[in-house]
Each structure stands twice: as C-alpha cells, then as structure tokens.
Image: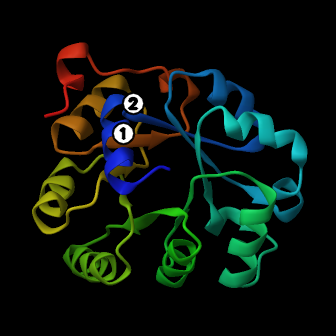
Amino acid sequence: MLTTEKLRKYLHKYPVIAAADVEHLSRAVSSGAGLVILMHLKVTDLLNQSLVPSVRRKIFFIHLDLVSGLSSEKEAIALLKKALPVHGIVTTKGNMIRAAKREGLLTIQRVFLIDSESMVTAVRGIKKNTPDAVEIMPGIVPSAVKQFRQKIDQPIISSGLIHTKEQIEEALKAGSDAVSLSQSLLWDYQRSNRDRTIG
C-alpha cells in the first residue's frame, strides 16, 4: 500500500509528474515520469475499462476538479473507487480531501498563490485537511516553496508555468519534492544519481 512516506520517497526518486489528459495517456505511461495525474476527464472516461491497464502501470492520481459531470464528493469518490484502480486524487477542495482520505485514497491538495493572504489561507487549509502532499501553483515561485517548507510537513509539488529543465531544477533546488507539468518533452527528466540519495 502506498503511504504518505512512501509517496515522499517515490517523488524524490521520480521528481517529474506527468499531468496528462486521456489523449496523451499512453505517452505519459511510457515516459520516465513515476506518477501520472489524469486531467480533463468526463464521467464516462472513468467508466472506460480500456484505461485500466494504463492506470495499473504507474502511480495514478485523478484530478477530481477537472472531471466534468460529478456533482458531489460522495458520488465522485464512490465512482472513482469502483471505476479505476488509482492511488489517489488531486483537488483544491478540503471536503474532497477528507472524503478521499476516509476511503483510503492518497490526496494532493492544490493551492493557488496570488498574494501573502492566499499563503496564510492555504497553510490553514492544509493543516485542517492533512493532505498527503501539496501542489503549489504557479510552480515558478521558488521563494513560495521555501516558505511552505517551513510551515508544512507534507511533500511539496510545484506546478504551473514550468516549461524548461532549468525551471524543474530551480523548483527542486528550492525544496520541492517534485514538479507536475503537461510538457511531455520534459516527462523523462530525472535527477542525477547523486541528487536521488534519500537520507
């Protein structure tokens, strides 16, 4: 079973997360990314059993906020648990985090930082909801990662506006455990062996 601590170690070993839609799923699965976040789905996509073999090949999360046609957290989590063998969810919503955790799914809480107040609000929500990891957007603000690292214990994922290898390295150097991006040319990025050592 994948736990928060195992997830942290896994993200350290495979620091790039492939954020992909169904159309780019096969590329994401065959890439060097260790984890895939599936986005921009319809409810009918969740019921598509042809996705199951792909989902079983990687650590998979579904971005529930980007699934059209779901009206409640109870319905969303119940359907997801029945439909696909995923490891967890990504969401901005605290009630979805709590519902998923009750069902034994790992959770990534996505937060948007636009000013100092949004950081205070985000930290408060993270402490209340206790997600397994936190995704910070935009991912090109290393100073925000450093501030979050001082306030929360969860693994930090940088996401949004990351388009180059240098930006990946900058996010990791700032303290991110991983980066999530939709740029498929960067999905094969790997840390050097020296940087992969887990203390």
Q: Is residue 66 left or right of residue 146?
A: right
Q: Is residue 19 left or right of residue 190?
A: right
Question: The disc labelled 2 sits on which kind of residue?
Answer: Tyr
Q: Quadrant location of residue 100?
A: bottom right
Q: Give the number of callouts.
A: 2
Q: Nearer the viewer, residue 91 or 141?
A: 91
Residue placed farthest to the top in the image? Answer: 193
Residue 137 visible in rendering: no
* Residue 198 x %, y %: 19, 32
Residue placed farthest to the left in the image? Answer: 150
Q: Is residue 138 left or right of residue 73?
A: left
Q: Quadrant of the C terminus?
A: top left
Residue 94 visible in rendering: yes
Q: Which mark is residue 14?
A: 2
State the residue at coordinates (27%, 79%). Answer: 127
State the residue at coordinates (81%, 41%). Answer: 51
* Residue 181 x %, y %: 49, 40
Q: Which mark is residue 163?
A: none
Q: Quadrant location of residue 20?
A: top right
* Residue 84 x %, y %: 75, 53
Question: The disc labelled 1 sits on which kind of residue?
Answer: Leu
Q: Secondary structure at mark 2?
A: loop
Label 1, on which residue? 11
State the residue at coordinates (28%, 26%). Answer: 166
Image: 40 above or below 26: below
Q: CA distance from mark 1 to mark 2?
A: 5 Å
Q: Quadrant location of residue 124?
A: bottom left
Q: Secondary structure at mark 1?
A: helix
Tell me the crowding category of disc 1: few under 14, some 14 to 19, or many 20 or more residues within 10 angstroms, Cα based.
Answer: many
Q: Badges 1 and 2: C-beta atoms under 8 Å apart?
A: yes
* Residue 153 x %, y %: 20, 62
Q: Is residue 175 left or right of residue 33?
A: left
